[in-house]
């Protein structure tokens, strides 16, 4: 399964970036496609679930699939027959940390080819969202 991604520098330690990004309640602050997060169930960690309420009106069911604070975190979201998976890894740097993102959008049959195109088309918006999160965290430390 092919993934796409990139890296965004954060001006805060990996622990701070990790805790902020993996908390569903924070997502509407930095993720441009989200209007709200609802139905959060469970503690932050593997198995936590929630519903993303997107600005286009889609409501994917989300779930944390891996959690290794402050090194790596993954989620997947399913809406109808489409699944999107996001993996974040956190690498300390002298100025804070780098957040490496990888994601893929998949589905059965013809959705598979469309998913790959949608994955590539989503790189810039995902990078922009993570840059927004880095700016929010950076403004809190100054």
Image (spheres, rainbow, N blue to C red):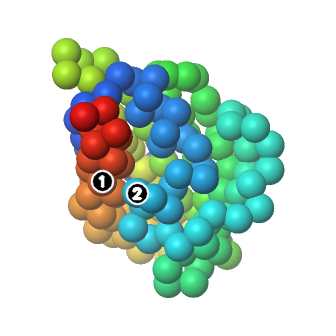
Say whether residue 131 is left or right of residue 43.
Answer: left
The image quadrant that residue 50 belongs to is bottom right
- How far from the left and from the top, in percent, is residue 109? 56, 73
Front in this rendered view, residue 116 or 94: 94
Q: Residue at x 44, y 28 (%)?
A: 16
The image quadrant that residue 80 belongs to is bottom right
Say whether residue 4 is left or right of residue 52.
Answer: left
Residue 92 position (above or below residue 35): above
Q: Which residue ends up furthest to the front in the rendered image? A: 142
- How far from the left and from the top, in percent, is residue 37? 63, 63
Say whether residue 27 is left or right of residue 137.
Answer: right
Badge 2 density bin: few <14, some 14–19, many ≥20, Cα 10 Å: some
Name the residue beneath numbered marker 1.
132
Front in this rendered view, residue 12 or 129: 12
- Residue 7's tag is none
Residue 25 in view: yes
Residue 5 in view: no
Residue 57 position (above or below residue 23): below
Q: Is mark 2 on a helix, strand or loop?
A: helix
- How far from the left and from the top, in percent, is residue 119? 37, 62
Residue 122 position (above or below residue 5): below
Image quadrant occupied by the C terminus: top left
Front in this rendered view, residue 64 or 83: 64
Q: Residue at x 80, y 43 (%)?
A: 42
Given contact means CB atoms under 8 Å apart, are the residues at marks 1 and 2 in contact? yes
Name the residue beneath numbered marker 2.
30
Of the residues under marks 1 and 2, which one precedes in the sequence? 2
Front in this rendered view, residue 127 or 111: 127
Q: Residue at x 53, y 73 (%)?
A: 35
Gap in Å between the C-alphas at discs 1 and 2? 6 Å
- How far from the left and from the top, in percent, is residue 138? 28, 39
């Amino acid at each position: 399964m092919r993934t796409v991604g990139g890296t965004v520098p954060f001006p805060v330690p990996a622990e701070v970036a990790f805790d902020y990004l993996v908390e569903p309640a924070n997502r509407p602050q930095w993720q441009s496609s989200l209007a709200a997060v609802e139905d959060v169930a469970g503690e932050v960690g593997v198995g936590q679930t929630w519903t993303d309420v997107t600005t286009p009106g889609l409501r994917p069911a989300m779930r944390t699939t891996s959690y290794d604070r402050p090194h790596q975190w993954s989620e997947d979201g399913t809406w109808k027959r489409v699944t999107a998976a996001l993996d974040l890894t956190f690498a300390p740097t002298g100025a804070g940390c780098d957040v490496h993102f990888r994601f893929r959008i998949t589905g059965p049959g013809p959705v598979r080819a469309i998913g790959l195109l949608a994955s590539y088309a989503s790189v810039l918006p995902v990078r922009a969202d993570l840059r927004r999160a880095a700016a929010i965290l950076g403004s809190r430390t100054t």
